[in-house]
Amino acid sequence: MSFSRIFTISTALVGFLPLAAGHSSLWHPSMYGFNVTQQTFDYDNRPVSPLMNMTFSQWWFHGHLDFPPNDGDFFELPAGKPATAEIACNKGATSFFASSEGGDIRTTNPNDVCPNSGSDAFHTKGFDDLTGCALAIAYNNDATTVQPEDFTVFSVNQTCVWTRFTDFQVPARMPPCPAGGCTCAFFWIHSPDSGGEQNYMNGFKCNVTGATSTVSLAVPKVPRRCGADSANGKWHSAPGNCTYGAKQPLYWFQQERNNMFEGTYAPPFYTDLYEFRDGPQDDIFEDSYVYLPDPSPTAPLPILNITSEAAVSFPWNTTRIEAAPLEE
Ligand SMILES: *[C@@H]1O[C@H](CO)[C@@H](O)[C@H](O)[C@H]1NC(C)=O
Ligand SMILES: *[C@@H]1O[C@H](CO)[C@@H](O)[C@H](O)[C@H]1NC(C)=O
Ligand SMILES: *[C@@H]1O[C@H](CO)[C@@H](O)[C@H](O)[C@H]1NC(C)=O
Ligand SMILES: *[C@@H]1O[C@H](CO)[C@@H](O)[C@H](O)[C@H]1NC(C)=O
Ligand SMILES: *[C@@H]1O[C@H](CO)[C@@H](O)[C@H](O)[C@H]1NC(C)=O
Ligand SMILES: *[C@@H]1O[C@H](CO)[C@@H](O)[C@H](O)[C@H]1NC(C)=O
Ligand SMILES: *[C@@H]1O[C@H](CO)[C@@H](O)[C@H](O)[C@H]1NC(C)=O
């Protein structure tokens, strides 16, 4: 596994609370803010710091647009294959410990998310409390001009954050990036069980490799809450209410530029609750659907473009959408 294929999400776990209570960020040389420390800003704006109730310039790219990666550092996204990320509570717990203030704090367990913070506790309980994380992409090599509406979620890991090495499946049909690469970001919102309206975002430079398709991504739409949600008294999914196809990330609980307006105890998640299937988001392309109606609780279901090219590696088809209502 080459270093370029590894990037790092950091999760600082608080005591013996479940994993979802942890602080998290992405660490990779391709990221914005790779070397930002507790002292860089006049508040703790390390990549692991959670983002909530912040101004746009504070939360967007974690306020790290002025801390770009070195030239040539990209996180590679191999079309049709997994991109492996590292998850750890501190840069020192990752392959990139050399530039960490505290040095190498890794343990003998390569999947140790947070060596000094009671990881045993969350590794044995809390798995059911995981709410997923996502990678999004904009086909724009200039992060400073990327807007929230430009990002499309292309891969979800619903069991994030659980192990340091975490796979994100890259859709097989991802088209090549423009000269100078693409702009990507990591997003995570954890379960409310351990408190805090915490959002996580870290931007990084990325590049699709091994592309075989040139079909563009569709314009991403705002995701909608459509799965069963027993924690909030909603016992049935509403499949017609889902946004299918290309979707923006979930921007929630900031002072500005939100696209989600859920309350404190009903956070939006990167799960089936918002039609973010586990794994590659294979239906995000311009030709993915032959029929894509506006969603509503009573809307008809969309119809996938079942051609050999457009349907490649679809994890489901319209028959299955109808036959298998979404679950939380
Ligand atoms: C968000 O921040 C504003 C301005 O600092 C403050 O007035 C408000 O109480 C905060 N809201 C929450 C929910 O923390
Ligand atoms: C981060 O710090 C390391 C060690 O000082 C340095 O080699 C590297 O170039 C820095 N990276 C960035 C993006 O500033
Ligand atoms: C999520 O990451 C874990 C750990 O790397 C991996 O085992 C799992 O297959 C990944 N899930 C998906 C859907 O890729
Ligand atoms: C992105 O990857 C493609 C395919 O490997 C390569 O041709 C291109 O030069 C890369 N772009 C950058 C900016 O590295
Ligand atoms: C439909 O989605 C909207 C937007 O997310 C949400 O407010 C509403 O509760 C959902 N309705 C149903 C029945 O799922
Ligand atoms: C369905 O996919 C095929 C193959 O990519 C494409 O030629 C066709 O235009 C697509 N149909 C629609 C409605 O996008
Ligand atoms: C869709 O899935 C159903 C059930 O798995 C299967 O019977 C059907 O042949 C599939 N249709 C297409 C077009 O792949």
Image: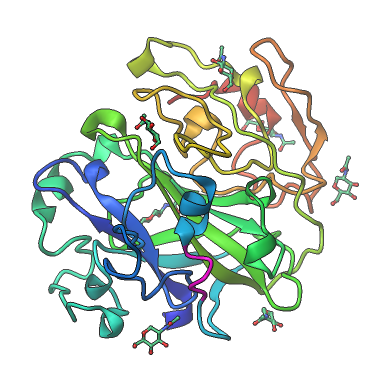
Q: Which residue is drawn at 26% across and 42% down?
A: 20
Going by the image, does 290 lie left or right of 90?
Answer: right
How many numbered badges does the structure rendering display?
0
Residue 110 position (above or below residue 291): below
Task: For residue 216, say whether it is visible.
Answer: yes
Going by the image, does 30 lie left or right of 140?
Answer: left
Our reading of the magenta stretch's main secondary structure is: loop
Q: Residue at x 39, y 47 (%)?
A: 51
Residue 55 position (above or below residue 268): below
Percent across and percent down for residue 122 are 15, 46
Q: Which residue is drawn at 65% across and 60% down?
A: 172
Check residue 268 for magenta coloring. Answer: no
Q: Which residue is drawn at 40% across and 73% down?
A: 34
Percent across and percent down for residue 207 are 62, 72
* Quarter of the render that holds ligand 7: top right
Percent across and percent down for residue 228 are 45, 18
Residue 316 position (above or below residue 135): above
Choose top left, top right, bottom left or bottom right for residue 42: bottom left
Residues shaded magenta: 64-68
Most extreme residue toward the front is 42
Going by the image, does 1 lie left or right of 44?
Answer: right
Task: For residue 2, say whether it is visible.
Answer: no
Residue 304 position (above or below residue 323): below
Q: Which color scheme does this rendered protein use?
A: rainbow
Q: Which of 25 and 133 is in front in this view?
A: 25
Q: Quadrant of the N terminus?
A: bottom left
Choose top left, top right, bottom left or bottom right for residue 145: bottom right
Going by the image, does 257 lie left or right of 147?
Answer: left
Percent across and percent down for residue 303 are 77, 30
